[in-house]
Image (tube, rainbow, N blue to C red):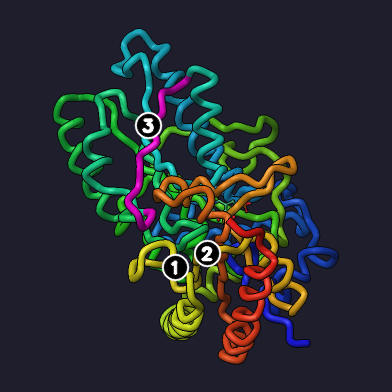
Amino acid sequence: MRKVYLDNAATTPVDKRVLAAARPYFSQRFGNASEPHLWGQEARRAIETAREKVADFLGAKPKEIIFTSCATESINLAHKGLLEAKLREFQNPKSQIPKKLHIITSSVEHKAVLETCKHLEKLGWAKVTYLPVDKYGMVRVSDVKQAIRPETILVSVMYVNNEVGTIEPVAEIGKVIKGINRSRRASHSPPLYFHTDATQAIQYLDCEVDKLGVDLLSLTGHKFCAPKGIGALYVRSGVPIVRQQDGGEQERGLRAGTENVPGIVALGEAIGQVQRSTFQVQNRVKELRDRLIDGVLKISGTKLTGHPTKRAPHIASFVIEGVEGEAMLLLLSDKGVAASSGSACTSGVLGPSHVLTAMGISAEVSHGSLRFSLGKDTAGEDIDYVLKVLPGIVVQLRKMAPAA
Ligand code: PLP
């Protein structure tokens, strides 16, 4: 049986060249980068080379890159670290910081952002506005503008939605924030900071931080062929962050804990490869995605979710009438195909996806959600195979579904 992996938005295989670059740092060059001896210095040099690669990709300075364990950690550090820094400033009686800090985010963020925001609300550190989205899952720039108040300290909007692939208007929001900061500077008010969760964007979109106008950017290696357990946070020079993990002075004192040297080397190699390859890979993946979309939409009762054109090259997402997403995944898996469904099974209860709900899709319809996410090695034959097996699975499941 053919095996077709179309769940690259969940995780990607480690690239062979990435593995080869990281391998010596497990048992040959295994030093602790904080030590002054030869072994330590070798590890230190490898970390700094990887930092330069990540910085180069983002159009940033190496000292603006903090290595973490994943995007979730980067997001937590960005949000909590910034809020804590601002609250500390607030304790200074001369400070201009407003008493109640305010965050703006969108209702379609990954849980890593939503749960962090909820936590900050619970702590009483901030009030949070969760912006609605349009039917394609896109945030309206006008809504961001309207939601900004004098006490707003952080706007956090993802670059690419992981469930439906919609590309959010991050650069446009960045421009709005720039304008706000010009007037804030004139009135000596504290600046507004902009964070983006770029987890699903790194492999396919331009992530230069100045073009996006972001102050903070989170990423995770395993979405672009580096291993799991390594991520990074970009922190623009001058953005105040308090570390959220106490201990040693690693990562400029912002992230304590002995560095994951093989992971960092792998991240640097993987991001370098993305930088060298993008255009061709992007177009090939996009073409295959469109072929998949056209094919799936030929099945009756199927609809594309997310924006029809402003979508990341690797994500094709649908709702399929009269079938249960989870059941579809199991039958696809029986045929050797890995895909994903938006409905999250939490504590045994199948809940509708918060993203599809925010897009105005009913719980009933969203239970039939299906996401295919392509990778740089997806082949045309993979798409042909999926289009061959999927119609039969849909028919089979519709036959089994209880009559309405
Ligand atoms: N943000 C987005 C958009 C994601 O897709 C994911 C992973 O699925 C994350 C954050 C979290 O990544 P990690 O689990 O590597 O921290």
Q: CA distance from mark 1 to mark 2?
A: 8 Å
Q: Determine which quarter of the picture holds residue 311.
A: bottom left
Q: CA distance from mark 1 to mark 3?
A: 30 Å
**Residue at image mark 2:** 321
Q: Are marks 1 and 3 in contact (CB under 8 Å)?
A: no
Mark 3 beta carbon near ligand 1 (under 8 Å): no
Q: Is any part of residue 277 visible from this angle?
A: no
Q: Is any part of residue 403 visible from this angle?
A: yes
**Residue at image mark 3:** 129
Please say if 144 is above or below 186.
Answer: below
Q: Secondary structure at mark 1?
A: strand
Relative placement, left or right, of 16 versus 113 is right
Which residue occupies 61% across, 63% down? 323
Which amino acid lies under the numbered mark 3 shown in the image of this protein?
Thr
Seen from the viewer's position, the closer of residues 139 and 398 is 398
Which residue occupies 32% across, 51% down? 134
Dot 2 alpha-carbon crowd within 10 angstroms: few under 14, some 14 to 19, many 20 or more = some
N-terminal-most mark, 3 or 2 = 3
Residue 175 part of the magenta-drawn span: no
Relative placement, left or right, of 182 versus 70 is left
The image's mark for residue 303 is 1
Residue 132 part of the magenta-drawn span: yes
Mark 2 beta carbon near ligand 1 (under 8 Å): no
Q: Secondary structure at mark 2?
A: loop
Q: Position of residue 385 (x, y in %)?
A: 63, 87
| Quadrant of image for the N terminus | bottom right
Please say if 156 is above or below 240.
Answer: below
Which amino acid lies under the numbered mark 2 shown in the image of this protein?
Glu
In the image, the segment drawn in magenta is 125-137
